[in-house]
Image (cartoon, rainbow, N blue to C red):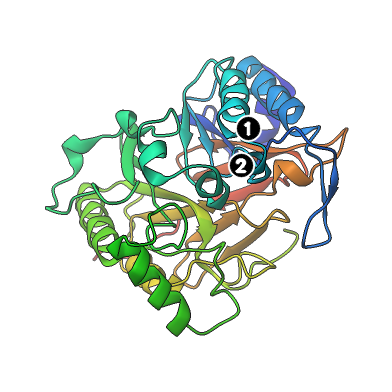
């Protein structure tokens, strides 16, 4: 057994994890020189593919091989669109992901929508809904108009990929009804996070999300949610669910204002938080978008983890993680700029 597994066992106090999975965000590959972004931060375009290769090599060699990898969005940079290199750059990065001995679940971010229309993405290899678990979705909501799905890699655990650009001025024809609605939402909204590079969740997706979470509450699952954008305003910069039911959320944009430093936040984060916090099955929300990363545990015990971006990791560094699911909680083992974190499951009195 390797030193990595020994360290995790000491912290969590359990002999073996139920399963593990990889997580990585904001690769943003482009064939261009390294340089400063509009945020005045350094972006290492020439290193992003090498960082991805090294992360995959580590995942492939782990004693307990990850079941899957969550790619949290912005897999290529919007710069590719200018030189008509979007498809070639995407093909290059996807070829690297195919060297992994486990599947990738892809989240869509703003840079996917800078490069491609939603129609294109739905037909591309970045659409990984083929791995969804529809059998457990007892709701009547449809996901036809947005990119969201859920899957269960292990008994009593569920992961939900959400579309944080369901409401967005990116990726749709300007005459599209949802585009027009998103324009109005953006114009009438208030707050520093009402930016075109952010987005939100529409009412249909929120209803679908509530349906899935209601099922998970009743089934005693633990849920992780993944999205591109954050749903909390601030994130610390160190930066009963029943014991047997966990739900994990995955998205590109953070949903908690305390889980990030920049204006990277879901437009209607208050609505999203109300849905998440109403369900005791929710354990964690994973996001990218803010390349500096962040973390916050809200008053309901939900962990909001914002992954550091690969694109701002210099030569000799990296930004990825492996998460171990134990009986007592999750352990995030960071690579490069990502720090280790222990994420205990919250306890809820169901009596």
Query: In this rendering, does residue 1 appear at all?
Result: yes
87 shown above or below 239: above
Nearer the observer, 275 or 142: 142
Q: Residue at x 83, y 36 (%)?
A: 317
* Residue 9, horizontal then vertical, whole percent: 62, 33
Q: Name the side, left or right, on which 268 lies relative to 310.
A: left
* Residue 201, horizontal then vertical, whole percent: 37, 63
Residue 159 figure quarter: top left
| Cα distance between the residues tagged 1 and 2 | 6 Å
Q: How many marks?
A: 2
Label 1, on which residue?
Answer: 85
Determine which of the numbered discs, if any, sits on residue 94 in the image: none
State the quadrant of the N terminus: top right
- Count neighbours of disc 2 (C-alpha within 10 A) and say few if under 14, some if 14 to 19, many if 20 or more: some
Q: Residue at x 40, y 76 (%)?
A: 185
Residue 133 figure quarter: top left
Query: In this rendering, does residue 159 appear at all?
Result: no
Q: Residue at x 42, y 72 (%)?
A: 183
* Residue 321, horizontal then vertical, whole percent: 64, 37
Q: Name the side, left or right, on which 230 lies relative to 261.
A: left
Nearer the observer, 275 or 39: 39
State the quadrant of the C terminus: bottom left
* Labels 1 & 2 near each other (Cβ < 8 A): yes
Mark 1: secondary structure: loop
Q: Residue at x 78, y 63 (%)?
A: 39
Mark 2: secondary structure: helix
- Count neighbours of disc 1 (C-alpha within 10 A) and say few if under 14, some if 14 to 19, many if 20 or more: some
Label 2, on which residue?
Answer: 81
71 shown above or below 260: above
* Residue 249, horizontal then vertical, whole percent: 42, 51
């Amino acid at each position: 057994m390797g030193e990595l597994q020994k360290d995790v066992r000491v912290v969590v106090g359990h002999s073996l994890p139920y399963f593990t999975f990889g997580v990585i965000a904001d690769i943003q590959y482009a064939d261009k020189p390294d340089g400063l972004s509009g945020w005045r931060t350094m972006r290492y375009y020439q290193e992003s593919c090498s960082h991805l290769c090294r992360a995959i090599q580590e995942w492939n060699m782990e004693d307990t091989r990850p079941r899957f990898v969550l790619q949290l969005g912005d897999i290529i940079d919007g710069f590719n669109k200018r030189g008509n290199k979007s498809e070639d750059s995407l093909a290059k990065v996807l070829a690297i992901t195919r060297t992994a001995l486990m599947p990738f679940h892809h989240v869509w971010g703003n840079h996917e929508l800078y490069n491609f229309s939603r129609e294109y993405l739905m037909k591309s290899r970045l659409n990984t809904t083929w791995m969804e678990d529809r059998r457990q979705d007892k709701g009547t909501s449809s996901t036809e108009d947005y990119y969201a799905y859920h899957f269960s890699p292990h008994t009593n655990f569920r992961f939900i990929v959400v579309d944080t650009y369901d409401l967005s001025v990116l990726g749709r024809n300007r005459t599209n009804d949802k585009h027009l609605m998103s324009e109005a939402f953006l114009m009438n909204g208030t707050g520093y996070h009402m930016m075109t590079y952010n987005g939100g969740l529409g009412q249909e997706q929120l209803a679908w999300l509530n349906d899935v979470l209601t099922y998970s509450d009743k089934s005693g699952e633990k849920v992780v949610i993944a999205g591109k954008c954050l749903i909390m305003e601030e994130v610390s910069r160190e930066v009963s669910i029943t014991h047997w039911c966990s739900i994990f959320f995955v998205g590109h944009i953070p949903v908690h204002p305390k889980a990030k430093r920049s204006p990277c936040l879901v437009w209607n984060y208050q609505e999203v938080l109300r849905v998440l916090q109403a369900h005791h099955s929710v354990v964690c929300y994973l996001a990218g978008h803010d390349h500096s990363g962040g973390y916050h545990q809200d008053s309901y015990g939900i962990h909001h983890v914002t992954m550091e971006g690969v694109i701002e990791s210099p030569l000799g560094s990296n930004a990825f993680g492996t998460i171990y699911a134990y009986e007592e909680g999750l352990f995030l083992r960071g690579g490069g700029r990502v720090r280790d974190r222990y994420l205990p499951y919250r306890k809820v009195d169901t009596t």
